Amino acid sequence: MTAEAVRARPDRSDPLIVPNSQHHVGLSIRGELTVLFSDGESLSCADVQGLSAVRSSQEITTLPDGRPRIVVTRLMTHFHSNETGLLIQQNPSRPNVGTLTGLKPGGAEALLPADVEFQQYLILSLRGRLYVNLDPLVMTATAITTFPPVGTTFLSQTPTTFYDVEDLDGGIGAQTAGTAKPRLALASATQCGSHVTHEIDMPDR
Amino acid sequence: MTAGAVLRALRIIAVLAGAVLRLALTRSRADTIASTMPRLGPTFLKAAQLLSTRVDLLPAAVCRGLAHVHDDLPPIPVAAVLPRLPRALLDSVDGDIVPAAAGSIACVYRAKLVDGRVVAIKVRRPGVAVVIARDLVLVTALARLAERFRLLGGMPVVAVVAELGAAIRQQLDFVAEVVALRALRTNLGAMPDVCVPEVFGEHCTADVIVMEHLPLPRGRTGGDAARQATVAALRAVYQMLFLDGFVHCDLHPGNLYALPDGRAVIVDAGFCRRLTDSARHAFATFFYRMSRGDGAACADVVLATARASASADPEGFRARMIRLIDGGTRGAVGEFELVPFAVELFAMQREHGFSADPEFVFPVLSLIVLEGTLRQTCPEVDFQLEALPFVLRGLMT
């Protein structure tokens, strides 16, 4: 990397970088991510790694207490586990959005440090079947100081059930289960999260 | 009403009057309840034990008092028991029959068979069915009076007594208990840390259950073994609730033992409930929604199962449920306490004009019975986290 490139790298701790920005990051699972099946079988997916891309809105809203908030959208999610064959991707038919909320009142200059929450709708591919969640998988990180929050672990503290796409009227676009029962669940006996390991440089052109 | 029934009614009224007087003088509610119930006989003793978990019906202080009622009675002498045992069993016994435990409904004896098996022989107390039947008739009549004159507020006393009566009669039914023991043993067979004694059906009768004798410790097992066994029992209850739909509702310390190797022994299947599949699924859904902090969805589950009165206020109930779930799930791991949560849940239903479906009440009660033991031996256990795999599988099946 040249000296010019280093100089050109933006300051990721500057809150003014948040509005209208886009980043790609590498992620790895921290904790015990387990896939539970209806027959009691469970798969431990300790080796899950992946990529994610996020874009933040340009528009800042202000909460009643004066804190700034901005909508963040997941553009891409891709995780895989070599050991189990599990593939996790974003469900393109559902919104995958979240919020970044500054901890202190203010405008764009108060967007960091912030709490971030994503509500994710995913497609799991496992053993030749596709599964989708109808309740969002909620991932949160608190008091992040950089954006993207490299070194931060997004935690999911609740379980999420997944339905076989073939059981759902509407396939991957289904929003209600109807008479279908969930076929597997993502859960953890401990707090589990995806750790942002590094930012991936994506040239503009 | 026969003269015997009248005398029995007078005796009950006299004991209750004495208890009321003692309550007024001592204000020691728990002691008074604990000492009064055994004097009233097996019906009241069992009713007290069953009511001790009914936080959906009674104030928590009364439940705590009832929880001190124990039915530790002298056993029927072996000589008096022998004529009640089947001939084939007596012919198979090698050595003495020894008293092991005695309760208000049955006594348990230990014996060795000629084939080397050591068995526990549970024998129903003679005449107990007649006493209970007579008492239930009296109590039902009193309940009608209490409900008619609203002596206990708006409590549906007749329905509660009918429910208790059914539960007590179930404990008299040894044929049903054999079926229940076998079902529990089959259902929990894949859990290596949980033991349910094997029933030897060839020696059982309507008054006698012969089962595998498990070497239960004389005193309470402590330390890691007790902790391991209690968690195993908790998981067994979750298996019953969320997956099997067949629930042992009476896992108080007298029916649950920890072996020194950390296994849990479950005995006395006299009070079990079979849930409908829809109730089992609704219960799993409630826990799943609770684990996600989704109070509105929890309210939907309860409202779909509860009975509504003319003055029912579903929106008020929903708003309170959202606050309850938010408060109950926001705390740190292990801070969730089931009893206050259940008390609030049932109180909310009453106050907003709903009465809980018994199908929803009994699963909660089975957990409440176990919670006391759990809090004593392993207070750090997180109810919700332990439930999670069973809840999720319950949703999927």
Image (spheres, coloured by chain):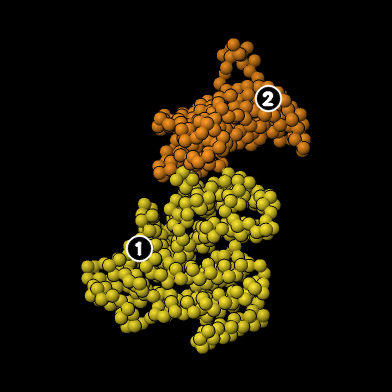
Chain colours: A orange, B yellow
Q: Is residue A137 left or right of residue B393?
A: right
Q: Is residue A130 above or below residue B121?
A: above
Q: Residue at x 53, y 50 (%)?
A: B282
Are the residues under badges 1 and 2 in a single subunit?
no
Question: Percent position (x, y) of residue B126?
Answer: 39, 80
Q: Nearer the viewer, residue B344 or B331?
A: B344
Q: Residue at x 38, y 69 (%)?
A: B174
Amino acid carrying label 2: it is Ser
Question: Percent position (x, y) of residue B370?
Answer: 50, 61
The span from disc 1 to disc 2 (Cα, nearest Å) is 64 Å
Q: Nearer the viewer, residue B55 or B133?
A: B133
User: Crowdedness of circle 1 by 10 Å Cα count: few (<14), some, many (20+)?
Assistant: many
Q: Which residue is mark 2?
A: A57
Tell whether label 2 touches label 1 (CB within 8 Å).
no
Circle 2 chain? A
Q: Is residue A153 above or below residue A189?
A: above
Q: For numbered disc 1, what is the local secondary structure?
A: loop
Q: Nearer the viewer, residue B307 or B171?
A: B307
Q: Is residue B117 left or right of residue B350?
A: left
The image quadrant of residue B60 is bottom right
Q: Is residue B7 left or right of residue B255?
A: right
Residue B301 shows in this picture: yes
Circle 1 chain? B
Q: Which residue is mark 1?
A: B197
Amino acid carrying label 1: it is Pro
Q: Nearer the viewer, residue B201 or A63?
A: B201
